[in-house]
Image (cartoon, rainbow, N blue to C red):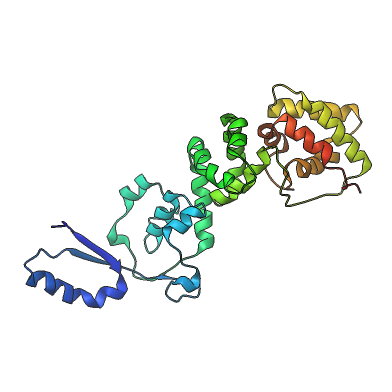
Amino acid sequence: DMEITHVIRGDEHLNNTPKHVLLFRALGREVPRFAHLPLILGPDRSKLSKRHGAASLFEYRDRGFLPETMVNFLARLGWSHADQEVFTLDQLIEHFSLDAVGSSASVFEESKLRWLNQQHMKRSDLERLVDLVKPFVLRRGNVTEEMWEGIGRDRLIRGADLLRDRSHTLEDLGWAMEILFPIPLDPVDEIEVTDRQAELMGGLADALEGLEPFTPAEIEKAIRGYLSSEGATLKDVALACRIAVTGRKAGPGLFQILAPIGAKTVSERLRSYPKGKRG
């Protein structure tokens, strides 16, 4: 009545299959096709269990893994197509075949899952990605719904585009995107600045505060112009400015990341950072 044509299960049930075939025949039912997949093992090559941190799909969703990542990752456990690792759903539908499923057990590696999720995030439509990351930003409790709506869709999209390359999950991206909002930073890195650097950063804050349009090209022009007038170069303050504004040493290009943060927040962070941080 359920019109089941295929029974796909783990190969620990292989020995039960003859009994199940006989039961179907005894009941006068059409025997479905049975397929047995290799077991999924933990990193220690024992059967995957809660001891290894095995979780439900809902837990992975709540940690910021995309649905397409989970489908891709699970399909690739025991199956392959050439050397391709990243598949869209349409590509899986086109290429997947039970005939290509191997017999060897597969190891569930979360590091590989995180890498794969990063690849799908890089390929994700930005409008959709911003919608998906929103609850991860808000649930941290530092950004309100009003703040989220207040900075504008365009800045959210540009920020997500710049920050997703270094994010492995939506949770990572949600944390990274907090730098776009006028809230205290959660810094990864700090730096001691000299009095001269503090002076230059204050001057840069003045130069950028009223800048319109606040685009990477105009930001670069304003920064280089001010530094040149002070007999300084970008190298003198680039790292200090990056850490003051983003809280991180590494990241997208300086001019690119300043743009979606906005002139007001950038200027405030440049002015306030040197306090207590002078070398």
Q: Give percent across and percent down for residue 232.
A: 89, 34
Does residue 42 appear anywhere in the picture?
Answer: no
| Residue 198 to residue 111: above or below | above
| Residue 231 to residue 276: above or below | above
Q: Quadrant of the N terminus?
A: bottom left
Does residue 244 appear anywhere in the picture?
Answer: yes
Q: Is residue 116 left or right of residue 224?
A: left
Q: Is residue 272 left or right of residue 155?
A: right
Q: State the residue in front, 13 or 175.
A: 175
Q: Residue at x 16, y 57 (%)?
A: 2
Q: Residue at x 68, y 37 (%)?
A: 257
Q: State the residue in front, 192 or 99.
A: 192
Q: Give percent across and percent down for residue 260.
A: 65, 33
| Residue 128 to residue 64: above or below | above
- In the picture as drawn, the residue positioned furthest to the right comes out as 195
| Residue 99 to residue 216: above or below | below
Q: Give percent across and percent down for residue 277.
A: 87, 47
Q: Is residue 199 left or right of residue 173?
A: right
Q: Is residue 23 left or right of residue 137?
A: left
Q: Residue at x 59, y 47 (%)?
A: 173
